[in-house]
Amino acid sequence: MSTGQRWQPLWQLRLGMRWLRLLTHQQRQTLLMMLLALATAVEFLENIMFVFASSHIVGGIDADPRSFALVQAAYAVGSMLMILQQQWLSRRFGYRHYLTGALLLFMAGTLGAATSHSLPQMVAARFVQGFGGGALFTSCRILVNVLFGPASRPRASRIFMIGIFTASALGPAFAAELIDHGVWQDVFYGVLPFAALAALGTWLLLPDAEPRPNAAGPALGPLLLFGAAVVTLQAALTEARFDIFSHPFRLALVAIAGLVLLSGFLWHQWHHKAPVLHVRALRNPVYLTGLAMYFVYYMINNLSGYVFPIYAEQALKLPLATTGWLNTFAAGISLAGILVYQRAAPRLSHKKPLMVTGLLVMAAATWWFSGMPPDAGPPALAWGLVGKGLFGVLVIIPIAGVTFRSLAGEEFAHGYRSKNLMRQIASSFASALGAVLLQNRQFAVHDSLVSALGQRPAETDQWMHSVQTALAARGFDAAQAHLGALVQLTGLVEQQARLIACEDIYRLIAVLALTAAVFMLLQRRLD
């Protein structure tokens, strides 16, 4: 008996509640489709809001960019450990209990993050949050295939994608408005009602599938080995800004240790009879090529997502709310593009041209951002934001379509778990890389600007004198006017250093996108 056939009578039994009898079968199916989209959208919403508000959150707990990378790593490790156990936990407890528990755990971590006052508290809360959130995307996407037959599955997939992209569109503006009218903790509190609604929906609507109490659990050793590998690699990346010149040998040893641990985990899974990650079942060359492109996409997308709020709010001095709505505008372009793509997809037999175009568009958008003057306003950013929005539609949706087309049944489930592991690794590394590179480049540019001012004392003194004169005319005494001029000069230097650093990161993203476009053009697996 197939998985879908086994679930069907249980699904009907769960929907035997009195109030649901008022709905038609199609309406009940639509309600369940929307629930799966909501449960997944909750994690996307929280993650996008967190990355957007990262500078405010890090400042709120008195941390630095390196600490932000550690906080991101905690979420990623928790999420990946949950993904590795997803198959066993869903079979052991049934999806209804499993997803409800995961959402409650996610809410507990979110509440812990909102009440954190120090870096260790935030790291622990994000780990718990990631452990709960790691169940959502993988499980809900698998359930789209499990709960719905071939006739209704395309509609379920469309609703699922629209839910994710809607959350992505609303997240930045929502985070900006919460902080603008409250405090940074509201970024976490704001997602709790949606998570609570999703938890209630999973408890009431998901089929009460029979759990398998005797199902063998995953061995603890491989999970610990995988966690140690990821933590070690993350540590190597986050310490790179501090150790690459002072302690390069130590940094190399840490990185090598992480790679050895990861290789050991993959070797163990390859040879184990009951692995937690079914590596051998995923040797399909199309799937592996798609997985590599997933990694590239998430690296580029998350690196850009980390840089833009800092670039717009701190380097261009745009208001926080404006920055949020600009991000939402770009995500809105993605959402509109999804709706167009869904109508046009059946007539697009070849996906490679779309993906190459998307990467070229992203390269052009980031190059556009890299040339903005310090006084650039929202209209000047519009073309770059349009390109940023089209990137997601033209790249990730075609990749998803071609990567999994050769996988079905259990292979699809294994493939989606592996893909979401890759997503967490790429997202965490991209955020950490962005934090480290941006801080490193900003310090270097700041030193260069200070040195340049020192080499032009006459011009610097003239500028200081003009500002002091203006402040004195407003009633400040000589000491206050001098201090005020010095503060303004320091602020200008910091803003310019941050702007140049952001623009350099955007040039790096453009190079990455161009390189990926060349690879996509030359490869023959994804077409």
Image: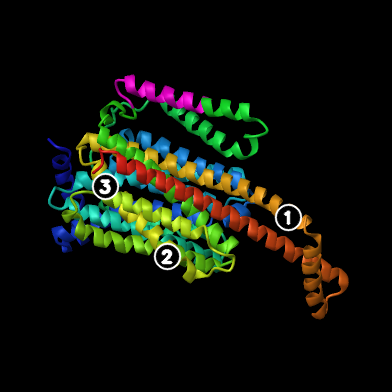
Q: Earlier in the sequence, mark 3 or mark 1?
A: 3
Percent position (x, y) of residue 211?
Answer: 26, 36
Q: Amino acid at mark 1?
A: Ala
Q: Is residue 169 above or below residue 44?
A: below
Taking the magenta stretch, the answer to whether it contains residue 270 is yes
Residue plotted at (70% across, 51% down)? 448
Span highlighted in magenta in the image: 257-275
Rendered-image quadrant of the C terminus: top left
Q: Earlier in the sequence, mark 1 or mark 2?
A: 2
User: Residue 87, which numbered label?
Assistant: none
Eye-nearest disc, 1 or 2: 1
Percent position (x, y) of residue 45?
Answer: 41, 56
User: Residue 352, which numbered label?
Assistant: 3
Towards the viewer: 6 or 449: 449
Residue 338 is drawn in which quadrant?
bottom left
Left or right of residue 218: residue 28: left
